[in-house]
Image (spheres, rainbow, N blue to C red):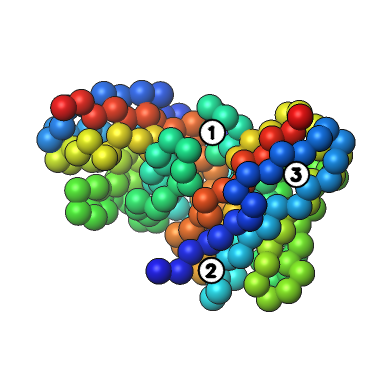
Amino acid sequence: EPEVTQTPSHQVTQMGQEVILRCVPISNHLYFYWYRQILGQKVEFLVSFYNNEISEKSEIFDDQFSVERPDGSNFTLKIRSTKLEDSAMYFCASSSGPNTEAFFGQGTRLTVV
Amino acid sequence: GQNIDQPTEMTATEGAIVQINCTYQTSGFNGLFWYQQHAGEAPTFLSYNVLDGLEEKGRFSSFLSRSKGYSYLLLKELQMKDSASYLCAPSNDYKLSFGAGTTVTVRA
């Protein structure tokens, strides 16, 4: 069964460093998303991406964050100058259409120390 | 803005039925998804309603009333493995907006 894969599964970084979280969406999907979940809290939308551009972004997704689809298979989230409060589980998701089931990857747990 | 309300916790006995209600106020509403999330894992899709009414899918059913901004997820014949968080998620064209989730605990 096709699945969304994310790497790494766990990333520890020092405050102020930059991290890149990687995702390989399902191959025939066209819509890509990043969500985050701070421990014990709800899943929060960060950004959606379609046709090589951002479709929508939340207030959380400020200049510290960027997304890229560098090739035909990867979808990355870059977080610059990480802060302690960026510690969370980051989920990538993809879907075949705008109102179809989104499939989630297993997440990258980011710990900023 | 958006507001999604669902109960924080529910407890039920194995074999029983539980109904999780969700009310929402969002902009650009297209439909409503329900996802299941086990602790430490990714959300997984359960159901999607775009029209008013009931959608049945095995032991799980979901209902939507667009005019009332209301949905529920019905879990029948509860099993221990159904212990999880259930996330109500209204959608527009570009995103799912998740509620805080309802933690369902199934007791033997």
Q: Which three-letter amino acid code belongs to the residue tagged 2?
A: Ile
Residue A98 drawn at (x, y percent): 54, 63
Q: Are marks 2 and 1 in contact (CB under 8 Å)?
A: no
Q: Which chain hosts label 1?
A: A
Please tell me whether residue A3 is drawn above or below residue A18 in the rendered image.
Answer: below
Please tell me whether residue B50 is drawn above or below residue A79 in the rendered image.
Answer: below
Residue A113 drawn at (x, y percent): 76, 29
Q: Which three-letter amino acid code belongs to the residue tagged 3?
A: Phe
- Tag 1 secondary structure: loop
- Neighbourhood count class around disc 2 (C-alpha, 10 Å): few under 14, some 14–19, many 20 upward: many
User: Which mark identifies residue A26?
Assistant: 2
Measured Cα–Cα span from mark 3 to mark 2: 23 Å
User: Which mark identifies residue A61?
Assistant: 3
User: Which mark identifies residue A6?
Assistant: none
Q: Residue at x 40, y 69 (%)?
A: A1
Measured Cα–Cα span from mark 2 to mark 1: 24 Å
Compared across the picture, whether A22 is left or right of A3 comes to right
